[in-house]
Amino acid sequence: QQQVKQSPQSLIVQKGGISIINCAYENTAFDYFPWYQQFPGKGPALLIAIRPDVSEKKEGRFTISFNKSAKQFSLHIMDSQPGDSATYFCAAPLEAAGNKLTFGGGTRVLVKP
Amino acid sequence: NAGVTQTPKFRVLKTGQSMTLLCAQDMNHEYMYWYRQDPGMGLRLIHYSVGEGTTAKGEVPDGYNVSRLKKQNFLLGLESAAPSQTSVYFCASSYRWDRGGNQPQHFGDGTRLSIL
């Protein structure tokens, strides 16, 4: 049973549009929420991460929004580009003070030119 | 700087055969991990290691064994392969947690394993 539930499984967006991926979690002990980006044939790579003491973090066109009361966090890709076409995974630590992660099921994003 | 290197990249096995997947990292990371990736399931942790000579079970350890004889290498073994182990396997490494909070994991490019 996945501890982090991710939606949608896939989405198609036009170039310049906004891609939104949502993740929900149950364990309120989670204190770190990274997002990983994976291109076909490659391993995942850390994209951006947030801690629950802030509600939003922005890095370039990528923004994480965090809603602690709803136990949800989201990745927004602004001005989506064809080069953003990839699979995105949200994650959370399996235990406090540790580096082991549990991942969501992934969202395949296709940005059409 | 190679990062995390996995060998082989592809392999086809018959049910009951055994094999070892190799992972090597050159970043002097303390922690290493093995994941499997299946459609819709994300990445699931199989086993991990927090240092040379130590290993521990992850979320889905059954049917796999691991060894970490050297800090830079982490081996994943399948003693008797089953079709349910058909998957893409990823190795990752990171600095240990107490080097400054949550450390990013660095992944290899995966091994695609098919078991017939």
Image: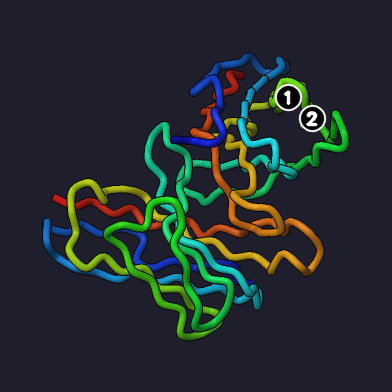
User: Neighbour class for label 2 at 10 Å: few (<14), some, many (≥20)?
Assistant: some
Indicate the quadrant containing the N terminus of chain B: top left, top right, bottom left or bottom right: bottom right
Task: Please identify the residue farthest to the front as the structure is shown.
Answer: A28
Task: Determine which of the numbered discs, if any, sits on residue A76 in the image.
Answer: 1
Residue B116, above or below A66 = below
Q: Say the numbered circle drawn on residue B45.
A: none
Residue appearing at x 38%, y 68% in the figure:
B7
Q: CA distance from mark 1 to mark 2?
A: 5 Å
A13 or B22, nearer to the observer: B22
Question: Which residue is painted at 63% across and 33% down in the image?
Answer: A83
Q: Residue at x 61, y 41 (%)?
A: A91
> Left or right of A27: which side holds A42?
left
Chain letter, disc 2 residue? A
Q: Position of residue B46 (x, y in %)?
A: 42, 57
Q: Secondary structure at mark 1?
A: strand
Q: How is the image coloured?
A: rainbow
Q: Amino acid at mark 2?
A: Thr
Residue in front for this viewpoint, B72 or A104: A104
Is the Cβ of the residue at disc 1 closer than 8 Å to that at disc 2?
Answer: yes
Give the residue type that dot 1 points to.
His
Q: Which residue is mark 2?
A: A63
Sequence-wise, which precedes: disc 1 or disc 2? 2
Left or right: residue A16 compared with residue B40: right
Question: Is B107 in front, or is B77?
Answer: B77
